[in-house]
Image (cartoon, rainbow, N blue to C red):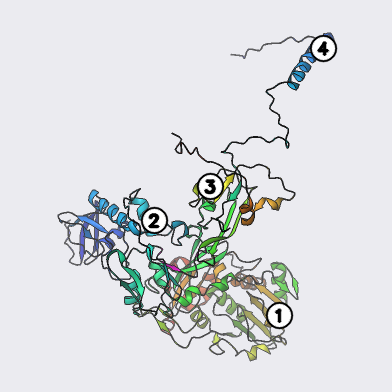
Amino acid sequence: MSQQPNPQTVTLTIDGRSVTVPKGTTILRAAEMVGIKIPHYCYHPGLSSPAMCRLCLVEVEGWPKLAPSCKTAVAEGQVVHTDSEKARAQRTGVLEFYLVNHPLDCPICDQSGECKLQDYVFAEGRVHGRSREPKRVFGRDDFGGDVLFYGDRCVMCTRCVRFMREVAQDDRLCVVERGSRSVIDTFFEKGLEGSPFAGNIVDICPVGALVSKDFLYKARAWDLDHTPSVCPSCSQGCNISIHTRDNLVQRLKPRENLEVNGWWMCDYGRFNYEWMNRRDRLSVPVVGGKAVGWSEAVNSLAEDLRAAIGQGAVRAVCSPLASNEDMGFLRALVDVLGGGEIYYRSRRAPDEIVLPGYPILARRRDLAPNVRGAELQGMIRVGDDEARGGLDQVASHEGIVLVLGDPLLDQGEDFGGRAAVYVYFGTYPSVAAGRARFVLPITTFAESEGTWINVQGRVQRFWPALRAPGEAWPAWRVLGSMLAALGEGPAPAEAHVAFERVAQRTPALEGISYRDIGTRGVMVREPALVSGD
Amino acid sequence: MPPKVKVVRRPEPERTSYLRATLKGMALTFRHLVNPNKVTIQYPEERPVLSPRWRGTHRMEVHADGRPKCVACGLCPTVCPANCIRLVGGEDDQGNRYPVVYEIDEFRCIFCGMCQEVCPVEAIHVGVDYENAEYTRDRFVYDLDRLMEQDHPTALLWDPSDPRSE
């Protein structure tokens, strides 16, 4: 069977492997598709390619010179060698030039362990440099914001300059001087201070030239555990990776997801992680002021709830940080207890901060990750833009009062004082939980598995990055056990079971399972939820 | 083939004299009293001479101004096979990387000397030292100050005249 060549695709050979790619693809991308990684610095999928690092040069048969693979489009029948004698010699030579002025300060460099120069030199560099000249020294420079610049370590890939120019569209960096004296600099005294996306240049810097002040000398790259997660700081739901060490979050890094955040995230989300490390946590279930085990807590609570069914409607408050599993089970519990209203309060910023070069990414107005999930469960938004107030009818409610995750910072000691049963599922001690007979410790998102729905209507999973303190349980597990004690099905043992239970009773999530969501997320089935802010 | 068994006939106990064997043993004992090649040393009045490559408890080298030489690069806790080094890095007032916490659990340590070998700034060393007795177990976790106070000689991990053992 003869194949008609498709005018939209091109077939070429890279290192003996035949590849068919869309027309206009670069050799570097085509090689990536078959798993051949061509070393590069200046190329970044989210930026333009100036082809100035000269590291991605490959041999193309019939061409007189090596070609920069990040810039060269594929052609029909091309034969490319990335690992030939000529290409390798070129890379070794280029790397030797990079090391002419690069300091040997890997022991104190924060990039050490995730540094592309280290990797490439280790793989293909010369064992000893031949340069006998003294190295040029720039020292370190404070670029403002969170960014420190070590000029000596820079390899002049200009990714940072191009990020600020093309993606942030806030031209604050440039290359000054020429030749070996060239260096990245800011304009006069106007640094990166105030730029809401400048933290990304630390991520894209392939070496340790741009480092984060926040992370400075804090941990070594190889000591960090990486957990895929979702940024909890706004309803955009940027895909992130939580880097932890010794059960503490050390930093957040964006995780590539072209549908949500590309390769980027905002500085607001990036540095809003200290609360995950808070130690003043609720860690054991407390019933009537006495610490008890979970089975006792669940049983006595079920008993109290059963006695209180029918004494008016339930009033519940839910944090918009809770997962869909938590919210779904809260709704199910409220329904079993006779129905009632669930309120949520979300902090709201005055406006969105859009990343101009990647406009689907913005710091959204809602500064909570699961506002869409709360709406999906029919929760009612109350309170002002600082997530205060709006709970008067809950504070003095005489039936069952449930609080899930909301810290109730604005409420007084007598919150829930007249309730028949007041249950506080929380992470931190709160003054307003003083009248609660049941204070049950739950985990934060960083300690449990679950899903959120972002502003686009995309269900996204997060994974546990930290160990939960003491006996804290995920809220869905507590609520599921409670429902089981009230005779409503078996208690879910795992998060995916909890999600399936919630999906069954929520039309917008119907048929979605953890496997479908994966690490990239899927859209909900309900178009009403798929919209901007 | 059945194994061959050699049957040894011993003299009957009541017909045996142990006198000869006892005298022989005592002769050995008295010979050792005056033996010039004795191995016993009169510790603590006499001290053993340790090899310069002896690997004992650690010592941290210090700069002239009293700062530790360690730059908190994290290589020793990474290479340590016994996982006995705890290190938390930080920035000092001059902007240098330095160890905020540096602890070695000498009970866990197997004295392999790899920390000394891997150190890029020759800060941590295993020492030529063996007098480590303490009254409590927690005293065996040496913190940075204690490591800097040690003044015993540091171990030579290789012969300086023949560093590659050729």
| Front: mark 4 or 3 | 3
**Marks 1 & 4, CB-CB < 8 Å contact:** no
According to the image, label 2 marks what residue?
A: A118
| Front: mark 1 or 4 | 4
Residue A484 seen: yes
Q: Report the magenta residues as a range.
A: A208-218
Distance between the Cα atoms at labels 4 and 3? 58 Å
The reply to the same-chain question for discs 2 and 4 is no
Q: In this view of the protein, which residue sits in the foreground, A258 or A142?
A: A142
| Front: mark 2 or 1 | 2
| Front: mark 1 or 3 | 3
Q: Quadrant of the N terminus of chain B?
A: top right
- Marked residue nearer the N-terminal end (2 or 1): 2
Q: Secondary structure at mark 4?
A: helix
Q: Quadrant of the C terminus of chain B?
A: top left
**Residue B116's mark?**
3
The amino acid pointed to by label 1 is Ala
The amino acid pointed to by label 4 is Leu
Read off the chain for label 3: B
**Residue at image location 42% in from the left, 59% down from the top:** A114
Distance between the Cα atoms at labels 1 and 4? 90 Å
According to the image, label 4 marks what residue?
A: B19
Quick one: label 3, few (<14), some, or many (20+) residues within 10 Å? many
Q: Secondary structure at mark 2?
A: helix
Distance between the Cα atoms at labels 1 and 3? 57 Å
Q: Secondary structure at mark 1?
A: loop
Q: In this view of the protein, which residue sits in the foreground, A344 or A37?
A: A37
Q: Position of residue B38 (x, y in %)?
A: 69, 25
Q: Position of residue A263 (x, y in %)?
A: 38, 70
- Work out which residue is located at the far right of the displayed protein and give it: B14
